[in-house]
Image (tube, coloured by chain):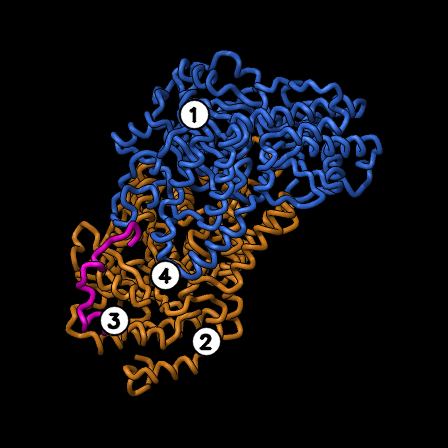
Chain colours: A orange, B blue
C-alpha cells in the first residue's frame, strides 16, 4: 500500500481520496449510466461526453449535407494521421510515426509481415516467432498464419520463461505489453533489449496499455507496435486500431520501396492519382490500407481528445499514479474483506508489473461476475483455456480507468463483492446462464 | 432510348416521368441537402433518413448506457452476419453466404489468398492473376501483393481482350463487375464461364454493382466476391465492406480446415472461448477477422434496410429499370444539347453493358466538374492515368442512384452542364484548383 490512511476498509477513506484526486474532474468528460460501477474499460471504454454530438455532426452535416466534399472540407482524408498524431504521445512515439487503421488484428498482420521482411531472421536457422502462451488469441492466430506463410513457426512460451534467455532461433519476439487475462505488464525496454541482443525484432501489442499506462516506444527501441482504440482510448465499440513502426524501419522501407502486404490505396503515395502501380507512401502511412470508417473514426478522435485534457493535471504520469492507487485499494480491500471465499489474486502484487486491471481467479468466476453485474458492478469474465489452466483459470477481470473511476467506486464494488460472496447468492441458478459474449 | 416521349429535351417530359415513377417515394427515405443535385452516389451514397437516429441510439444507449453488455443485448456480436444476410439477396447470394467485414481492399486480400489455395492453378504453369488494366487501383495493388507472395504474377489486359480466349496460364480472373471510370459492366456469367472453361477461378469486385444493378452470384457460378458498403448501399463514409464465397469453396474450406490468412478472432469457430489454436468458423464467417466498428456497422445496416422497402415496388429489377432510364435520359440530353464542346461519351451506349453511371471525357474535365459543383451539381472527376490514357482519359463521372435521383434532377443537371459549356465559365481560374481528393 502506498497510502498512509489508517483504515482503507472504511469508506470515508475512499471519499477523502476522491476529494483530493487531481483528476476527479475528468470523470465529467464521460457519460456514465446511473447505478452502474463500470470496471470494464479494459474491454470497452466508456462514452466520452463529446462523442454523441460529434458523431451526429459527422452523420448529419459532414455526410448528409456536404456529402463527398467532406473528404476535403471536413478533413476526412487526413483523419487517420491526425488521430495517430494524438495517440503518439500517449505511447512515446513521435509525430507522423503512428497511424489509425483497420483492426488490431489486421495491423498485427501488417507489422509481422514487415518484421519478417526486415528481420535478421532471413537466416533460415532463426525463423521463429516467439510469443507468450497466454497472449490474446487473435494475436496468436495471426502470428501462426504469418509464420506458416513464410516458412516460419510460432512457438509459445510460459510467462516465466521470458525472464530467461531467448531461444537463439528467435527472429521475432511478439508480446502484448499488458496481458488481457492477468493484467501482468511486461518490461518493454528490457524485453526489447533482450530480443535485440538475441538478434530478433520486438513487436508489441499495446491493446491494454495505450491510455492506461505510460509506454515509451522510442525510448524502449521497440520495432513495431499495434494497439486498440476501444479500450482505454474510449473510441467506441470496435473503434479502429493503430499501428506504429520505429522510424529506422519505415526509413528502410522507404529506401527499399518495401510494401506491407495489405497494400491498399490509402497506403499509396498518391492515392487519388489512381495509378496502376503501387508506390508506398513514405513513413507510417504505408500501413494504411482501405477507406477508413469515418463514423467510428470520429468517435475515436473524441476518445483520444480526452487525454489532451489531462495535460494540466500531470498527464499520463498522473493517470498512472491514480491507476496504481485504484488497483492497490481494490487488492487491499479484497484481501482484507473477502477472505475464505477462494478468490485468488492473479495479477502481480508489484505495481510495476501490473497494468490497470486486477484479475481474481475463482472456480465459479462466471456466476460471481453475473451476480455482480446484476448489482450494477460491471467487470467481465474469462474462462480458463482448455489446455491446462483448468478451473483456476476462471478469471474475474476488473479494469480501473483512472479517467473516470473513483476510489469510492472501488470501495463500493468490493462491498458488492463481499455481499455476493458472503450471501452465496451467486449459487442461484440464473447466474449460471452463459451468453454469446461472456 | 426506351422512352416514347416525343421530346425529352422538354423538362415537362422529365416531370411526367417523375410523376409516373413507382419508386419516387423512396427518395423520402433519404436526407438530401437543398440546392444540390447529387450525382456521386457511386462514390459516397447519400444519407438515409433513419441513420442519424440509429447511430445516435447506438452511441448514447447501446454504448453509453448498456456498455459492454450490448455485445449480447443489442446483438453486436451477430451484426456482421445479420447485415450480410440483408445484402445477400441484392447480389444473388443465399443466407449465411455473405458477411460484412473490414474494407473492400482487405476482403479482396482474403479471397485472393483463398482462391490461390483452392485454385487449379497450383499447377506452376498457371500461376497468373489476370485483371483489367483500368480496374480500380486498390484491387490491382492487392492482387499484385498477393501474387508476389505466392510466386504468381499479375497480368493486366485491355478491356477488349476480355472478349477473347483467356491466357491458358490464368489461375484467377479478377474483375470489377462495373468499371469505376467508365461505368462499363461486364457479363459476369459469361466471363465466369470463360474462366472456369480455362481452368481458372473468377473473383468479382461488386463495389459499383451492389445495390445498383442486379447481380446473380450463385446463378453465375462465381467463385468469390467482395463489395463496398459506402456507394450504392448508402452505408456512410468508409462503411465496412462485404465478402462472399461460393458455398462449394466454403464447404471445401470447412472440410480441409483451410483458413484465410487474416485469421482473426471474429473468424474463429468460438471466439469467446479464447483458445490458443485457430479453428476457422464454418462457412463465410471464417472471413471475418477483428472486432467490427459498430457505429459504422449500424449506419451500414440502415443503408441496406432501405432496399427492403423496394420489395413492394419491384425490388432490384425496378431499380435497374429506373437506373437505365435515368442514364439514357442523361446520354440523350447531353448528346442533343451539349454538342460541339468536345464532351465524349465513354460509357457504353448499350444499357446491358453499363452500370448506373455515365462518364464523359473532356480534356478539361476537372475544371468543368468544379464549375458544376459550384452550381450544386455534384458528380466527380477522375484524371487520366499516367500510362497512355492521356488527356482523353480525363473523366467527368455522373452516378445515378435510382433510390433517390429524379428524372428532373437529370434534366436540371444537363441544363447546368449546358450553361457551363455554353458560357465557358469553367475556364475561370478558380476552377483549376485541385483538392486532395478530386
Residue A410 occupies quadrant: bottom left
Q: Chain of mark 4?
A: A
Measure how far apart labels 2 and 4 are at the Cα level. Answer: 19 Å
Mark 1 or mark 2, whichever is nearer to me: 1
- In percent of width and height, residue A25 lies at 49, 75
- In percent of width and height, residue A228 lies at 42, 54
Q: Residues within 10 Å of mark 4 (few under 14, many from 20)?
A: many
Q: Residue at x 32, y 76 (%)?
A: A411
Measure how far apart labels 1 and 3 are at the Cα level. Answer: 54 Å
Measure how far apart labels 1 and 2 are at the Cα level. Answer: 57 Å
> Label 3, on which residue?
A417
- State which tag comes first along the sequence, 3 or 2: 2
- For the question of whether residue A20 can be seen, the reply is yes
- State which tag comes first along the sequence, 3 or 4: 4
Of B282 and B196, the residue lying toward us: B282
> Label 4, on which residue?
A42
Measure how far apart labels 3 and 4 are at the Cα level. Answer: 19 Å
Q: From which residue to which does the magenta span run?
A: A417-438
Is there one chain holding both mark 4 and mark 1?
no
> Label 1, on which residue?
B217
- For this orientation, the residue located farthest to the bottom is A6
Q: Residue at x 28, y 52 (%)?
A: A435
> Label 2, on which residue?
A24
Of A374 and A193, the residue lying toward us: A374
Q: Secondary structure at mark 3?
A: helix
Q: Chain of mark 1?
A: B
Q: Residue at x 53, y 69 (%)?
A: A309
Amino acid at each position: 500500500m502506498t497510502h498512509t490512511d489508517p483504515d482503507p476498509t472504511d469508506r470515508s477513506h475512499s471519499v477523502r481520496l476522491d476529494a483530493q484526486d487531481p483528476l476527479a474532474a475528468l470523470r465529467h468528460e464521460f457519460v456514465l449510466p446511473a447505478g452502474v460501477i463500470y470496471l470494464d474499460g479494459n474491454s470497452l471504454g466508456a462514452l466520452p461526453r463529446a462523442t454523441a454530438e460529434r458523431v451526429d455532426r459527422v452523420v448529419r452535416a459532414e455526410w448528409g449535407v456536404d456529402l463527398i466534399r467532406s473528404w476535403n472540407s471536413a478533413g476526412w482524408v487526413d483523419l487517420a494521421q491526425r488521430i495517430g498524431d494524438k495517440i503518439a504521445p500517449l505511447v512515446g512515439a513521435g509525430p507522423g510515426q503512428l497511424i489509425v487503421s483497420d483492426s488490431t488484428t489486421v495491423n498485427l498482420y501488417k507489422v509481422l509481415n514487415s518484421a519478417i521482411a526486415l528481420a535478421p531472421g532471413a537466416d533460415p536457422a532463426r525463423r521463429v516467432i516467439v510469443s507468450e502462451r497466454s497472449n490474446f488469441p487473435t494475436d496468436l492466430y495471426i502470428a501462426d498464419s504469418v509464420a506458416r506463410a513464410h516458412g516460419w513457426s510460432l512457438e509459445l512460451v510460459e510467462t516465466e520463461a521470458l525472464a530467461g534467455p531467448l531461444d537463439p532461433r528467435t527472429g521475432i519476439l511478439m508480446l502484448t505489453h499488458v496481458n488481457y487475462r492477468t493484467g501482468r505488464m511486461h518490461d518493454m525496454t528490457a524485453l526489447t533489449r533482450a530480443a535485440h541482443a538475441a538478434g530478433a525484432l520486438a513487436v508489441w501489442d499495446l491493446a491494454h496499455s495505450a491510455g492506461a499506462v505510460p509506454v515509451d516506444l522510442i525510448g524502449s527501441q521497440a520495432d513495431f507496435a499495434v494497439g486498440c482504440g476501444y479500450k482505454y482510448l474510449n473510441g467506441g465499440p470496435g473503434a479502429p486500431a493503430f499501428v506504429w513502426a520505429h522510424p529506422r524501419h519505415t526509413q528502410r522501407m522507404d529506401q527499399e520501396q518495401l510494401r506491407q502486404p495489405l497494400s491498399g490505396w490509402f497506403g499509396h503515395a498518391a492515392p487519388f492519382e489512381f495509378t496502376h502501380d503501387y508506390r508506398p507512401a513514405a513513413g507510417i502511412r504505408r500501413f494504411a490500407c482501405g477507406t477508413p470508417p469515418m463514423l467510428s473514426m470520429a468517435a475515436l478522435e473524441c476518445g483520444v481528445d480526452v487525454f489532451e485534457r489531462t495535460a494540466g493535471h500531470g498527464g499520463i504520469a498522473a493517470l498512472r499514479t491514480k491507476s496504481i492507487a485504484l488497483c492497490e485499494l481494490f487488492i487491499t480491500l479484497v484481501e482484507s474483506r473477502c477472505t475464505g471465499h477462494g478468490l485468488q489474486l492473479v495479477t502481480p502484487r508489484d505495481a510495476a508489473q501490473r497494468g490497470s486491471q486486477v484479475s481474481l481467479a475463482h472456480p465459479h468466476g462466471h456466476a460471481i461476475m453475473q451476480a455482480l453485474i446484476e448489482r450494477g458492478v460491471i467487470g467481465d469474465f474469462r474462462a480458463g483455456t482448455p489446455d491446462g489452466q483448468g478451473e483456476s483459470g476462471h478469471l474475474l477481470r476488473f479494469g480501473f480507468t483512472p479517467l473516470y473511476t473513483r476510489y469510492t467506486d472501488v470501495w463500493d464494488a468490493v462491498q458488492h463483492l463481499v455481499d455476493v460472496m458472503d450471501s452465496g447468492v451467486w449459487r442461484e441458478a440464473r447466474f449460471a446462464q452463459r451468453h454469446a459474449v461472456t
